[in-house]
Image (spheres, coloured by chain):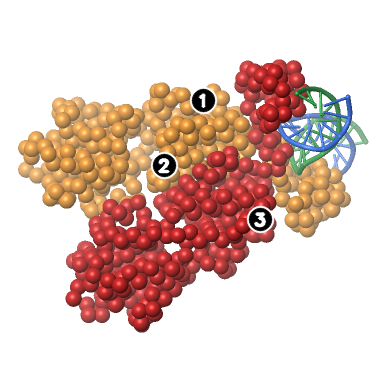
Chain colours: A red, B orange, C blue, D green
Amino acid sequence: MSTIRDVSKAAEVSIATVSRAISHPEKVSKSTLKKVNAAIKKLQYRPNMLSQSFRNKTANCIVVLVPDIANLFFTTVIKGIEEVAQKRGVNVLLGDTRDSSGRELDYIKLVETKQADGIIQLRPYTKDDSALPIDFVSAVNASGCENTPYPSVRIDNVSAAEEVVNYLISIGHKRIGVISGLVKNPHSIDRLRGYKRALKRAGIEFDDRIVTEGDFSFWSGMNASEFFCRIPVEQRPTAVFCMNDEMAIGAIKGFKSKGVSIPRDLSITGFDDLEFSKYCDPALTTVSQPAEMIGKKSAELLFQIIDGESPSQSEYVLPIEFIIRKSTSVPQP
Amino acid sequence: MSTIRDVSKAAEVSIATVSRAISHPEKVSKSTLKKVNAAIKKLQYRPNMLSQSFRNKTANCIVVLVPDIANLFFTTVIKGIEEVAQKRGVNVLLGDTRDSSGRELDYIKLVETKQADGIIQLRPYTKDDSALPIDFVSAVNASGCENTPYPSVRIDNVSAAEEVVNYLISIGHKRIGVISGLVKNPHSIDRLRGYKRALKRAGIEFDDRIVTEGDFSFWSGMNASEFFCRIPVEQRPTAVFCMNDEMAIGAIKGFKSKGVSIPRDLSITGFDDLEFSKYCDPALTTVSQPAEMIGKKSAELLFQIIDGESPSQSEYVLPIEFIIRKSTSVPQP
DNA sequence: GTGAAAGCGCTAACAA
DNA sequence: TTGTTAGCGCTTTCAC
């Protein structure tokens, strides 16, 4: 493996000139540039990035903390991050934390030990969240909730949920159930607030007997359908607001297997707009998050912070799109 | 940010002693060790890994080339890789190549420029595969096929496919269709060879009119079901061997929607044993690959190569498990 | 058991 | 435009 020194010898110039020829070719005369490039080619020289990083005090690497790498929403956000990072020549280290704060800490250590320049945290920040020593590492929160104490890129979960429920009310639903995520999850909290806000605006009283807790999984959605089927028909909701698509799809499957026709007997809405949601039967009415844009924006924000620029905004709230498909209809008389 | 020099001052020892206290504590007296550790704690010293990597000429990082990061089989392999890497204190850089050789080359460059110590390639190697300069970088192929020209960890696709088809034949099927992956894909080629071998053994002639090409996706499986439904019933296969689970599940959905009952009218087998395959209706008869073990073994193999040990074996063929569930039964008389 | 010193490959300030 | 040189933070030999 040849070094810059070998190149300098082969090109009969100093190592400084070689270094310049590579990083600032405009500062080098045409003729020497040619000599240097020839030598580089001949020796198959590749700069040692380890050395370069060390010297420049930058790892050229950021880490993305992902709760679940197999989740399509996250992979789309990551795609956006990678696109921006790649333009800058920065590597993206994916930290699949599997919701373990221990693993999260391991990845944060990478920033502390300079192996990474910054971190993007792909999950809602919670109050008792000691994981990120935010005054110490460059960090951005992506796809979180309100009141994140460090720079963040997210959607307005409250308004989005409100918009969904407003729509259900507008087409005639008065009794609207909820399949929530884990009740302590900030996303669940925000989306429930939006639900309540829509109810209040329409003068409908909140009834916690038609709210059930899931865990954002397909199976918890299916279970929830049983919960609703046990409610006597006259008290049963005519629509169910699910806090994500997976649970909505699980619920649809559960209801169908119990002979409840969607949307004839019951309207269902989701949240996230998974790839699959437009193909499922019936196609899901849901909220589409600008996942790729969330990724891009958060990467841009992180790089600003790394560069020491004070970003013009420290919180970006991106617009969502409410998509009406076939899983909702007017309630039966 | 404090350096080793600050620690040495605070502990009133030389920097060499601090370095030793950290890397080889046994070479340092108890009393100085105590002083050094106190200083480290007081100054909140974290070794600069960039410098350490540079000095030690190792990045403490390997890259895993993944064709599709959202694929559950791959994420399971990765889990195995990460487990082994973590024990060694090595980071895993996930390279989602999205089947693009351009992106693959970018990641290989990381090894050439010393930013990563080695590479695990998670896809079958093809003959015209110029991507990996194998004599230059430490590399291992995982979950590929026969005749990979560098160290590899895989299953025996031919035998696995043969076992599946043998089983179908043993329970009475004589006319067995195939939903293949892309015909040029080495996995497809190997699995088709296994299929043919089983046929030959049973004295059944190969009939390419009941073999159709998919692309390993759910939708291509669904399309394939239409292909089979267009075949007159008397010529239609009584069983279909699908080259992966996704296509099998798509096919089941397609057949069901056309009134073909599985397994009563038609038996279906998959390949991979996705998480979902045991829950789908009917639960899928399929081949389970030891995904996590493939990951572990390939990481171990790579580390051996990086360490310059010549591995005892350069090809590991791991056993599969054939799982009989509910999507197969004896053919109707 | 400990310290002094060289050096890993590269960049940048400064001098020529 | 080019070369000389110091030094980034760390490890390791070699003396003591």
Horizontally, is A29 left or right of A73 in the view?
A: right
Residue A260 position, x and y percent, is 20, 67
Residue drawn at x 53%, y 33% is B106
- Is the residue at mark 1 from the same chain as the one at mark 3? no
Chain letter behind tag 2: B
Chain letter behind tag 3: A
Say which mark, if any, is on residue A217.
Answer: none
Give the distance between the C-alpha atoms of the residues marked 3 and 2, in whole angstroms.
36 Å
Q: Nearer the viewer, mark 1 or mark 2?
A: 2
Residue A143 position, x and y percent, is 49, 59
Say which mark, if any, is on residue A310.
Answer: 3
SS assignment at label 2: loop
The residue at which mark 1 appears reads as B134
Horizontally, is B330 left or right of A15 in the view?
A: left
Chain letter behind tag 1: B
Amino acid under disc 2: Asp
Amino acid under disc 3: Ser
Amino acid under disc 1: Ile
Q: Nearer the viewer, mark 3 or mark 2?
A: 3
Judge whether residue A317 can be spotted in this image. Answer: yes
SS assignment at label 3: loop
The residue at which mark 2 appears reads as B68
Judging depth in this view, the residue of B300 and B189 nearest the camera is B189
